[in-house]
Image (cartoon, rainbow, N blue to C red):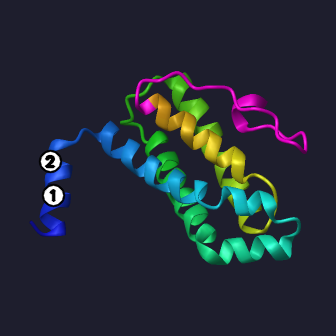
Amino acid sequence: MSISAYKQTIRESASPKQIEARVFARITGSMEQHRANWLAARDKFARTAVLAHGLRDAVAENRVLWSRLRTDLTDDNNQLPTELRANLLSIAMWVDRTCGVVIGGGDGLPALIDVNQNILGGLSGQRPTPAAVTQDGTQSHAQAV
């Protein structure tokens, strides 16, 4: 079976929620692969090397995903409850800002991963778990809200 036929089969047999979960899992996994190296990097120069080895692409892809979600959430035809849409829009704006900070070599990668994992858990029917405060005292979006 060709790859395009396989992708077509997935689109026809998977629900939109399952497809979203797959995309979140793939992107979050890509960012997670770089977490240890990111945390070990002590300055922007060292973080630039981590970004150059694939993290920049993963964070940029995460930013695009959340941008598309933001567009969908602002669509008048979106059927999610208003409060949930507002909360997700708030998260989407935070993700956009934090992705920019991370791409610039700043803090925030673990928080981005935590938020995505919580969204992925929600798509899978699991309750989100509160993320721990990081060593430098920063909080994830879930803790700040």
Does the segment drawn in magenta span residue 120?
Answer: no
Say which residue appears at 55% left-offset and 39% top-offset. Answer: 117
Q: Point out which mark residue 62 bears.
A: none
Residue tagged 1? 8
Cβ atoms at labels 2 and 1 below 8 Å apart = yes
Report the front residue among 41 and 73: 41
Report the front residue among 46 and 60: 46
Residue 72 seen from this side: yes
Placement of 113 over or under 59, stated as above or below: above
- Residue 98 in the figure: left or right of residue 57: right
- What range of the chain is rendered magenta? 123-145
Q: Residues within 10 Å of mark 1 (few under 14, many from 20)?
A: few
Residue 127 pos. (x, y %): 53, 21
Report the front residue among 115 and 133: 133
Placement of 62 over or under 24, stated as above or below: below
Residue tagged 2? 12
Residue 30 pos. (x, y %): 53, 59
- At label 2, which amino acid type do we have? Glu
Say which residue appears at 52% left-offset and 31% top-offset. Answer: 85
Instruction: Please tell me whether mark 1 sits on a helix, a strand or a loop.
Output: helix
Quadrant in which residue 3 is drawn:
bottom left
What kind of secondary structure does the magenta stretch mostly adopt?
Answer: loop
- Residue 36 in the figure: left or right of residue 28: right
Say which residue appears at 25% left-offset and 38% top-offset. Answer: 15
Placement of 28 over or under 114, stated as above or below: below
